[in-house]
Image (tube, rainbow, N blue to C red):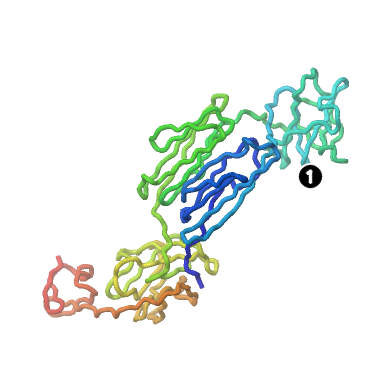
Amino acid sequence: KIDAPVNTAAKVTLSPNGGDFQKTISVTATLSNNAKSGWYKIGDGEQVALTPGKAATFTLGEDMLEGESKTVTWSATNAEGVEKTGTATFNKKKEVVIPTPTGIFAYFLAPAEWSDIHVWAWNDADNFTGGTWPGVSCTKTDMKKNGLDVWMWKFDGDLTGAPTNIIFNNNGNGVNQTETFTFVNGAVYNRSGKTNEKIDAPVNTAAKVTLSPNGGDFQKTISVTATLSNNAKSGWYKIGDGEQVAFTPGKAATFTLGADMMEGESKTVTWSATNTDNETKTGSATFNKIKEVVIPTPTGIFAYFLAPAEWSDIHVWAWNDADNFTGGTWPGVSCTKTDMKKNGLDVWMWKFDGDLTGAPTNIIFNNNGNGVNQTETFTFVNGAVYDRNGKTNAFVNGAVYDRNGKTYESVSTGINQVGCKKAPAKLQIYSINGVKVAEVNKVSDAEYVLAPGMYICNGKKFVIK
């Protein structure tokens, strides 16, 4: 049994959806298109109304202390008045700054069970790590070496000279400390001592602009968030051949594409970012507006199809003795892929939305006319119909079909089945000499099966040119 599609709950999508951050964080809140209304609020602040399908961006952290958290609450109400709420919590952490490795520094490849690396470094005259065990904390980088996290210590005091000895420890936690190693400036150590590993010194990385989403297909309109990295000195983006729009490092800018685009049209968003070393990086992303996919409400004439895993573009060909309900050009019209699965297979749906009377008697599903990837002819309504294996008599309006024919799956719709009128008798076509040459549904169909010439139908002559 496949439940009919219903009006789903509205929602607000937060990006990111909570989590830890340093300094500040830019958050985008987007109210779903099917919402009637919605809002968000930060902590105990005022509710901020949202527009369906439009993104709103706000920044957290400027008024927060390290270790402080704030909760963003949201509410969304759909067209049926059903409200959905949610929250996300953001935690401000101590800023981690990876120092540029000049002066006195060393790296440590930490054992997996060590999580709070400290260093104790000294010579015969001075202690370079405060003089109180377990010393000073190291900085965890975003690098790994041999599968181990790389931690870094850099001396930032005013002592002259350099250490001669160094010990790494897990914040003085019992036996979790190394032996005393000879200090070599810039060396890479592990728990056993100095290694021969080399770690490329962190450099001032290139600035960049992050687009979310980073291009791709969309329907109707799409909200795009552009964020300039914190290490940028300047940056901009532009849409197509439009003007450059400057923005602030670490701050998100949101814009909408699609309102002035035709289906099948594309637009490219180009960006540029320059870091403090005046190195410029550029990039682009292309957005393609495609035909809107609407999952129809299952009333009238419709059917589902459980597609084989290798089929990806389901079309349908449906007809009766008088009319074709799928355009009349093979492979017919495309089906709609729903968000449902049945027996592990994707559920596709076809719904007739034309103005023909009656209903089909035959139906074929195919993978966009792709060679042998089509079903046999299945009965859609009662009447004599042949499939690949012969004549069948089964019919259920709104039945669920798989590749082998109608299944015993059913669809709950709460509607009456569509009535069908009896198909008219076929027209007999005769040559001018009185020989029957064809049977067709309509006189106009004869031109597709007969050669040019004069013929007779219902006692009247007509010419095919």
At horizontal 38% and vertical 63% (from top left) the residue drawn is: 369
Instruction: Work out which residue is located at the far top of the displayed protein and give it.
Output: 160
> Compared with residue 424, is residue 133 higher up or lower down, i.e. above or below?
above
Residue 124 placement (x, y as % from top left): 88, 21
> Compared with residue 380, is residue 44 higher up or lower down, i.e. above or below?
above
Residue 442 placement (x, y as % from top left): 22, 73
Q: Is residue 370 in sight in this rendering?
A: no
Instruction: Tell whether 401 sits left or right of 353.
Output: right
Q: Which residue is mark 1?
A: 113
At horizontal 55% and vertical 36% (from top left) the residue drawn is: 251
Front residue of this view, candidates 144 and 41: 41
Residue 276 placement (x, y as % from top left): 57, 25
At horizontal 56% and vertical 43% (from top left) the residue drawn is: 27
Kind of residue indicated by mark 1: Glu
Instruction: Tell whether 220 sits left or right of 451.
Output: right
Q: Is residue 156 in sight in this rendering?
A: yes
> Compared with residue 328, is residue 234 higher up or lower down, i.e. above or below?
above
Instruction: Identify the image quadrant of residue 160.
Output: top right
Element type where label 1 sits in the image = loop
> Compared with residue 149, is residue 445 higher up or lower down, i.e. above or below?
below
